[in-house]
Amino acid sequence: MKRSQRMQLIEKLARQREDQAAQALAQTRQRLEQEQAQLTELEGYRGEYLGYLETQGSAGLSIVQWRRTQGFIDQLGGVIGQQEGVIKQWQRQEQQVLMQWQKLYQRRKSIGQLVDKLSLQEVIEADKQEQKALDELVGQMAQRSGPGR
């Protein structure tokens, strides 16, 4: 097996690793988008309850209802804070996975360039050997036909 063929196998394995990292990156980004959508939804709920508290408060909301609604809004604020923390974790995860993918991409690309270089060298070497064989054949034919024939 030629050296370029062995390197092509290594390149294939490197491509598989790169593809796996790309899939992991896509999954991480999808999860991050889901978490961001959930944050948007929570913020929307909090906005609705703040609006309810404002409109109902001016219309004469009982102190008990006001405290319950305000308590719920405060709980939503806590959940929103937690969700923001979750999003930051997923953003860090995304960066790590992205860096891993970039590293694997560069490695695979370098291996591919090496395979191309080795293939070219092998073609050049094969051409040299073929030319040498042809030269020898021509030399042998010239000796057979010789000057006296």
Image: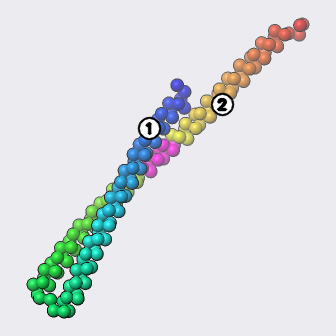
| Magenta stretch in the rendered image | 101-110
Determine the image quadrant of residue 57: bottom left
- In this rendering, the answer to whether 22 lies above or below 52 is above
Q: Which residue is mark 2?
A: 124
Q: Looking at the picture, which amino acid does disc 1 mark?
A: Leu
**Residue 87 percent across, percent down from the top left:** 30, 63
Q: Residue at x 43, y 41 (%)?
A: 16
| Viewer-nearest residue: 120 or 9 | 9
Q: Main secondary structure of the magenta part?
A: helix
Left or right placement of residue 23 versus residue 59 in this view? right
Secondary structure found at label 1 = helix
Q: Which residue is mark 1?
A: 13
Q: Nearer the viewer, mark 2 or mark 1?
A: 1
**Residue 37 percent across, percent down from the top left:** 32, 67
Quadrant housing the C terminus? top right
* Discs 2, 1 touching: Cβ within 8 Å: no
Is residue 96 visible in the rendered image? The answer is no
- In this rendering, the answer to whether 55 lies above or below 25 is below
Determine the image quadrant of residue 18: top left
Q: CA distance from mark 2 to mark 1?
A: 27 Å
Q: Residue at x 45, y 40 (%)?
A: 14
Is residue 32 visible in the rendered image? The answer is yes
Q: Residue furthest right?
A: 148
User: How many discs mark residues in the rendered view?
Assistant: 2
Q: Residue at x 89, y 10 (%)?
A: 147
